Amino acid sequence: MLKTFQVLDSLIFSNLYISLGAMSLSYVLFKLAGIPVNYVILVPFFIIFVIYTFNGKTDTREDALSDSKKFGFNKSYNRYFLAFAFAGFGLLVVFSFIKGVKYGLEVLVPFVIGLLYSSRISLKSKMIRLKDILFFKNFIVAITWAFVTVIIPASFLNIPFTQDIYLLSFFIFSILLIDEIFFDIKDLKGDSEVGTKTIPAIYGISFTNKLLFFLNLTFVLILIIGYWVGTVDTFLVKIGIFSASYGFLYMLLYNLNVIEINKLSNIIVAGQFIAVGFFVFLITSL
């Protein structure tokens, strides 16, 4: 059992777990479009892997305060995973530009955003990071995930950008926005110490908790209304309802103090993306 948890910790702290989640969300796109899964599903994996691994390098102070196990792992192994991440991403960039300049640029855009997000830049004689800006942090992560897991693979696969593709992007944006705000609760101590302005740090945990419930409920209502007026089909409704139910579940677990916040965030909340892909596998296979 101990070995199992050690392997799981390694998957989580190395960012392989979250990167597999990106692949899983792209799997939903393949099923939505009715296309057999192929090599393009690896594109989101390498983009998310390099962004999150680089972010792990720049967030050492926050991790030291908020998640000592993650800090210890990154201190020992981050440089190796960072080398692997940049090597894999470099090959992806070369392949993408060979395929076409448009594809190469699409792959580079989220990477550049990730660098700007994590790195300190000079603004009005102050050194800040984009992630230190209130609300912007959550918004930019959510929209980047939607772009990486849906828009880029759809472009590589030459899938027409229909209403369903944009709706799937909106669903993923919504899931990530809610998840990212929840992650800020876990990182509250570290973010407050280094001056990162997050919703929990500014408005408190009680307000954040209510906001998360409100956002998840709003997401459900949008789904129901969309289905009722005929803009959201049954396949997307099933995915949306599953995702919203999953969100309510981890909020309940948090409020009941069933699982320690770091484990809840690292395993269950981050695992939502893998769970969505598995759910889609089940409903399309049975």
Image (cartoon, rainbow, N blue to C red):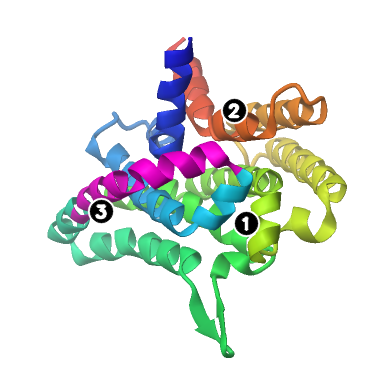
Question: Label 1: how many residues lie within 10 Å, few (<14), some (14-19) or many (20+)?
Answer: many
The kind of residue tagged 3 is Phe
For this orientation, the residue located farthest to the left is 98
The amino acid marked with disc number 1 is Asn
Secondary structure of residue under mark 2 = helix
Reading the image, the residue beneath label 1 is 138
Residue, disc 2: 268
Dot 2, how many residues are within 10 Å of its Cα: few (below 14), some (14-19), or many (20+)?
A: some
- Residue at the (45%, 37%) spot, across then down: 13
Residue 165, given in percent of the width and then of the height, sits at: 48, 46
Q: Quadrant of residue 141?
A: bottom right
Q: Kindly indicate whether the residue at mark 2 contacts the one at mark 1 (C-beta within 8 angstroms).
A: no
Query: Mark 3 or 2 closer to N-term?
Result: 3
Q: Look at the numbered disc 1 and give the secondary structure of its residue.
A: helix
Q: CA distance from mark 1 to mark 3?
A: 24 Å
Q: CA distance from mark 1 to mark 2?
A: 19 Å
From the viewer's side, name the closer residue of 85 and 106.
85
Q: Which mark is residue 108?
A: none
The residue indicated by pointer 3 is 86
